[in-house]
């Protein structure tokens, strides 16, 4: 009899839990219908008094967000939430996403990059993606390239559905179209490095830029020529635009260039200003052979740095706010070593680009793996994903 009572009690508890879960799903579905997503953008200015109260610490943002989220799953006081509106494969290994923001984006521009956040199995993952379009109605476009073993990119490519809501960070980045480029602009991209350059190219052409523009995109296979149909359309529409591809994994044909970047590839290409984006090795190779104005953005770390061959030296790492101290080494980044000891610092690209992992160096010396530069000023901001300790280090984390 006692066993039957416990079984009945457990069954009742599970039925109540299921009812609450069903009620929540029904409520969210109704709210999504009763409060159109477009209203969130229109209502955003009306939240300014609440933002002021939060800024003065008279209200907690988390409490305000909880109420707003109850009214609509994508409504927040300051955080950028975006609805997935469309998916389009633009290459064999690249998917373009069209998202509509909730009105909290702040002066976003094509060519900048944003952090995209997704929670999986209780772990909050994020990666940085470039803005290839920013529309006045709140729509933005991103493009995501498949990476072997990529935990977040493969999930987005294979499972993200239209109608889902994602969180984005505020946009950052300094890549911009040259102001003085009467003799033309040259765009060089490798792989997904095309995405920020395409965003800037679209904006410049639509804005009336009529000087010569040449885009050279390096890919392994022709099936990886992202946005090729759109680029063909731009070629037909704008006579000042030239587009070429370089193929490294297949035999080149027609006017295609063969192999990875070589100095000879620059011959015959016009443009006084160069915009450059791709892996670190690609960017470094182009820099060696270009003497004019140049803007560059890289999305990978160098394969080697000046101190990469050094032997491991034990040292002490201390993270002040976490009250954690342990023995580390001078070979791995502060982010990697913090994670190995149970910390979960905020981070994004893990390549020193997005600045999500920026912390304050309180004492000690760290080396930036991108340039080899040493940082030792107390109070200096460092990006812990690319900062390797050179001795005992104290970080405000």
Image (cartoon, grey):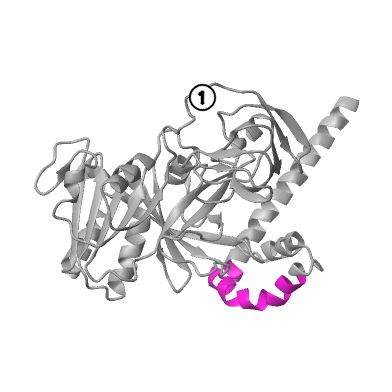
Q: Quadrant of the N terminus?
A: top right
Q: In the image shown, does 299 or 303 lie closer to the viewer?
A: 303
Q: Residues within 10 Å of mark 1 (few under 14, many from 20)?
A: few
Give coordinates of residue 74: x percent, y percent. Answer: 60, 62
- Magenta residue span: 33-53
Q: Residue at x 48, y 66 (%)?
A: 108
Above or below residue 306? Residue 227 is below
Q: Residue at x 58, y 67 (%)?
A: 104
Q: Which residue is mark 1?
A: 310
Residue at point 74% right, 68% down? 55
Q: Indicate whether 284 appears above or below 337.
A: below
Number of numbered discs overlaid on the protein picture: 1
Residue 355, how many percent across, how many down? 56, 51
Question: Is residue 305 rendered to the left or right of residue 387?
Answer: left
Measuring 52% from the left and 51% from the top, which residue is drawn there?
354
**Residue 91 appears anywhere in the view:** no
Q: Is disc 1 placed on a helix, strand or loop?
A: loop
């Amino acid at each position: 009899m006692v066993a039957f009572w416990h079984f009945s009690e457990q069954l009742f508890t599970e039925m109540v839990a299921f009812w609450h879960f069903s009620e929540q799903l029904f409520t969210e579905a109704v709210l999504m219908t009763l409060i159109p997503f477009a209203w969130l953008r229109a209502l955003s200015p009306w939240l300014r008094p609440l933002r002021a109260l939060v800024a003065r610490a008279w209200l907690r943002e988390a409490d305000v967000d909880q109420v707003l989220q109850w009214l609509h799953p994508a409504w927040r006081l300051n955080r950028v939430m975006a609805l997935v509106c469309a998916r389009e494969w633009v290459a064999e290994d690249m998917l373009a996403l069209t998202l509509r923001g909730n009105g909290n984006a702040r002066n976003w521009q094509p060519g900048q990059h944003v952090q995209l956040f997704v929670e999986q199995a209780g772990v909050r993952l994020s990666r940085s993606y470039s803005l290839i379009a920013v529309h006045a109605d709140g729509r933005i476009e991103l493009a995501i390239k498949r990476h072997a073993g990529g935990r977040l990119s493969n999930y987005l490519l294979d499972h993200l559905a239209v109608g889902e809501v994602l969180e984005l960070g505020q946009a950052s980045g300094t890549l911009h179209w040259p102001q003085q480029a009467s003799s033309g602009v040259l765009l060089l991209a490798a792989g997904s490095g095309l995405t920020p350059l395409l965003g800037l190219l679209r904006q410049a052409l639509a804005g009336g830029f009529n000087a010569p523009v040449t885009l050279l995109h390096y890919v392994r296979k022709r099936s990886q020529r992202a946005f090729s149909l759109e680029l063909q359309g731009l070629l037909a529409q704008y006579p000042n635009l030239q587009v070429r591809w370089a193929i490294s994994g297949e035999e080149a044909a027609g006017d295609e260039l063969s192999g990875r970047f070589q100095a000879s590839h620059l011959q015959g290409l016009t443009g006084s200003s160069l915009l450059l984006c791709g892996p670190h090795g690609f960017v470094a190779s182009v820099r060696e052979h270009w003497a004019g104005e140049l803007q560059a953005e890289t999305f990978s770390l160098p394969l080697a740095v000046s101190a990469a061959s050094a032997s491991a030296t034990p040292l002490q790492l201390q993270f002040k706010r976490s009250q954690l101290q342990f023995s580390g080494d001078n070979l791995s980044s502060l982010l990697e070593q913090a994670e190995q000891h149970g910390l979960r610092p905020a981070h994004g690209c893990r390549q020193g680009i997005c600045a999500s992992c920026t912390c304050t160096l309180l004492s000690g010396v760290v080396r930036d793996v991108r340039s080899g530069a040493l940082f030792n000023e107390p109070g200096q901001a460092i990006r812990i994903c690319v900062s390797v300790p050179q001795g005992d280090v104290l970080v405000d984390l």
